[in-house]
Amino acid sequence: MPKTNYRKDMTRLNFTLSDALPSLPKSGMPVTIITGFLGSGKTTLLNQILH
């Protein structure tokens, strides 16, 4: 089995963030994204906001 130089075979990907994301609509709704580690209280925060 011949040895393959994977580094030589790989091609560089050139794109911008706007190429990867869909275009934004003219009107929309505000969205809040809640992130955090496991056990950091995301669900508790959401429950406090909703109740």
Image: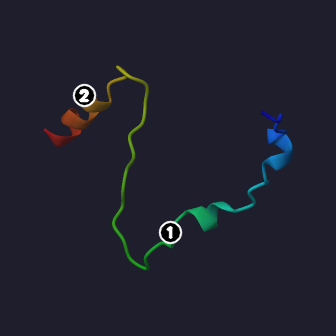
Q: Hey, which residue is sitting farthest top in the picture? A: 39
The numbered disc on residue 37 is none
Which residue bears the numbered disc 1? 22
**Residue 34: x percent and y percent?**
38, 40
**Label 1 SS:** loop
Relative to 41, say whether 26 is above or below.
Answer: below
Where residue 37 appears, as percent x and y from the top left, is: 43, 25
Q: Which residue is mark 2?
A: 44
45 relative to 25, above or below: above
| Mark 1 or 2: the one toward you | 1
Q: Amino acid at mark 1?
A: Pro
Q: Secondary structure at mark 2?
A: helix
Q: Is the residue under label 2 in contact with that under label 1 (CB below 8 Å)?
A: no
Please state if 17 lies on the left or on the right of 2 as rendered.
left
Q: Is 27 in front, or is 11?
A: 11
Q: Nearer the viewer, residue 48 or 25?
A: 25
Q: Earlier in the sequence, mark 1 or mark 2?
A: 1
Most distant residue in the left direction:
51
Image coordinates of residue 21 in percent, x first then y, are 54, 64
Vertical placement of residue 13 versus 27, above or below: above
Residue farthest toward the front in the current orientation of the protein? 1
Residue 19 drawn at (x, y percent): 62, 67
Q: What kind of residue is marked 2?
A: Thr
Task: Left or right? Give the position of 49 relative to 8.
Answer: left
